[in-house]
């Protein structure tokens, strides 16, 4: 019988769960005679419908009423980010195993040779490989040496072993130390037919052509997230020729390059976060992604505003969700005349506008009001404003009075929700009290507040894009 010590040893605070977590859970399922047997616990891994797993009768079920299996699954779903609770639930009953392991193995992180070996051993078991939906490959940011374990991982034909993988995250990696600029090394990514979401964080490419070849290698990519992605803007290896070239009179080894260069991405959403070369990325997106529904530009700098404005204008009515933040610390005149650079009136299909107000100082706030004025005659239903509050008096400045007037007018038209996402150090109660005092006309009608720590990542998108 399982002891309390057995269960506590299986609990790990790490999220996403590591490969050690997966091995520990499997071992405890085998060692504990009264816990669900591994064969029964994994009998339904090949199906997505967790509710199809019948509730096994027990001796107590005849005396005490049992919760429906759908309700048990729903309760377990609420603990998606709590691996300790999920591990405990997996050892309670056979009918709890599938829902618990569905979340435990949903996201896996590989961050070195040790976890790679355990991961390869784990996916050799067919009952576990189909549970992995999100794979995170994290390199060592403190080393410049070649990380051969990543090359080894990519050579394992993961596309065949992870049939339900839909999200791939690559973090803190110097690309040239893995595959160099050899174009044959990208063919492994063309086999990921199920991957629709790609996250790149802290990845350093030798040149922009290498980055573009990686993105274009995924055949069904629909969501692209970039944060702190860099390359040498003065360096190119000529891997991708100029767009609109034709294969006529071209060497056979260059035909693949031309095909990729002329290929258009079927992206539904794109996020250009911090430290991204927007001067190179935006023109490329304009040529390859014409039907974007969701765009996030949370940190538009002074010199990038005009380029960003042309990009958004070109999307027209296809744009449904926009998350925009402007940083004009030393450009007060530009902040007050933001409408000359960014014009949202052409985006008639916009339904959700998320403004990132990371600096609440009086001289950098004037960019908010003109954008709210632009959507006055549009059918925008939700406005989300990210703010960092440290003092309630930050909301008592003149720019916030104008923001209040615009929000009051918008809620009388199409806007149904005004959501403030507070990420600052001010307590939740104090922040809510300050917002209620600043926007008394919206209290009880459209005003909502979400308290999120600064490290919390929240993506407000249309449901079909999440």
Image (spheres, rainbow, N blue to C red):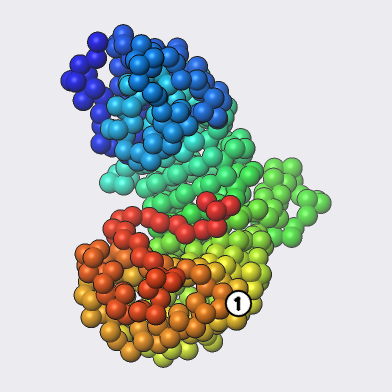
Whether residue 375 is visible to the viewer of this picture, yes or no, is no
On the image, the x and y values in percent for residue 238 come to: 60, 55
Residue 431 can be seen, yes or no: yes
61 and 365: which is toward the camera:
61
- The quarter of the image holding the N terminus is top left
Q: Nearer the viewer, residue 446 or 169?
A: 446
Q: Is residue 280 above or below residue 63?
A: below
Residue that protrudes farthest toward the right in the picture: 248
Residue 274 location, x and y as percent?
A: 40, 63
Question: Residue at left 36%, top 87%?
Answer: 401
Above or below — where is 202 with respect to 311? Answer: above
Point out residue 406 in the picture as x, y percentages from the top left corner. Answer: 46, 83
Residue 263, image x, y percentages? 69, 53
Residue at image location 74% in from the left, 42% down from the top: 252
Q: What is the quadrant of residue 232 in the picture? A: bottom left
Name of the residue lying farthest toward the front: 63
Alpha-carbon neighbours of circle 1 within 10 Å: few (<14), some, or many (≥20)?
some
Residue plotted at (47% across, 59% down): 460
Seen in the picture, residue 371 relative to 159 is either above or below; the reply is below
User: Which residue is denoted by mark 1 in the rendering?
Assistant: 378
- Local SS, label 1: loop
Question: Is 198 on the left or on the right of 240, as rendered?
Answer: left
């Amino acid at each position: 019988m399982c002891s309390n010590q057995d269960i506590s040893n299986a609990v790990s605070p790490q999220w996403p769960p590591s490969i050690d977590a997966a091995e520990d859970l499997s071992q405890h399922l085998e060692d504990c005679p009264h816990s669900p047997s591994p064969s029964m616990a994994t009998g339904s891994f090949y199906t997505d419908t967790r509710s199809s797993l019948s509730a096994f009768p027990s001796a107590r079920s005849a005396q005490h009423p049992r919760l429906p299996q759908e309700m048990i699954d729903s309760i377990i779903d609420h603990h998606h980010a709590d691996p300790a609770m999920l591990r405990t639930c997996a050892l309670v009953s056979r009918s709890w195993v599938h829902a618990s392991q569905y979340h435990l193995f949903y996201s896996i992180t590989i961050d070195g040779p040790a976890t790679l070996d355990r991961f390869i051993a784990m996916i050799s078991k067919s009952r576990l490989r189909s549970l992995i939906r999100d794979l995170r490959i994290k390199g060592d940011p403190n080393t410049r040496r070649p990380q051969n374990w990543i090359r080894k991982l990519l050579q394992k034909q993961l596309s065949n072993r992870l049939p339900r993988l839909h999200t791939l995250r690559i973090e803190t990696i110097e690309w040239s130390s893995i595959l160099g600029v050899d174009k044959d090394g990208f063919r492994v990514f063309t086999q990921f037919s199920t991957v629709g979401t790609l996250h790149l964080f802290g990845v350093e490419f030798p040149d922009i052509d290498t980055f573009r070849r990686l993105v274009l290698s995924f055949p069904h990519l629909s969501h692209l997230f970039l944060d702190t992605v860099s390359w040498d803007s003065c360096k190119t290896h000529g891997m991708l020729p100029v767009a609109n070239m034709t294969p006529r009179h071209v060497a056979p080894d260059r035909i693949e390059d031309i095909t990729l260069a002329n290929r258009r991405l079927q992206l539904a959403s794109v996020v250009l976060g911090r430290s991204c070369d927007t001067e190179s990325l935006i023109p490329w997106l304009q040529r390859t992604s014409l039907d974007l529904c969701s765009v996030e530009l949370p940190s538009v700098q002074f010199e990038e505003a005009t380029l960003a404005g042309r990009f958004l204008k070109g999307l027209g009515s296809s744009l449904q969700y926009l998350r925009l933040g402007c940083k004009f610390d030393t450009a007060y005149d530009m902040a007050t005349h933001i409408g000359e650079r960014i014009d949202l009136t052409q985006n008639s299909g916009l339904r959700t506008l998320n403004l990132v107000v990371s600096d609440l100082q009086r001289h950098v706030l004037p960019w908010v009001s003109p954008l709210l004025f632009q959507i006055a005659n549009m059918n925008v239903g939700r406005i989300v404003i990210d703010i960092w509050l440290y003092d309630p008096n930050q909301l008592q400045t003149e720019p916030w009075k104008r923001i209040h007037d615009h929000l009051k007018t918008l809620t009388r038209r199409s806007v149904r929700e005004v959501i403030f996402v507070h990420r600052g150090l001010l307590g939740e109660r104090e922040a809510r009290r300050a917002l209620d005092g600043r926007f008394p006309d919206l209290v009880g009608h459209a005003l909502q507040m979400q308290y999120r720590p600064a490290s919390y990542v929240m993506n407000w998108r249309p449901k079909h894009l999440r």
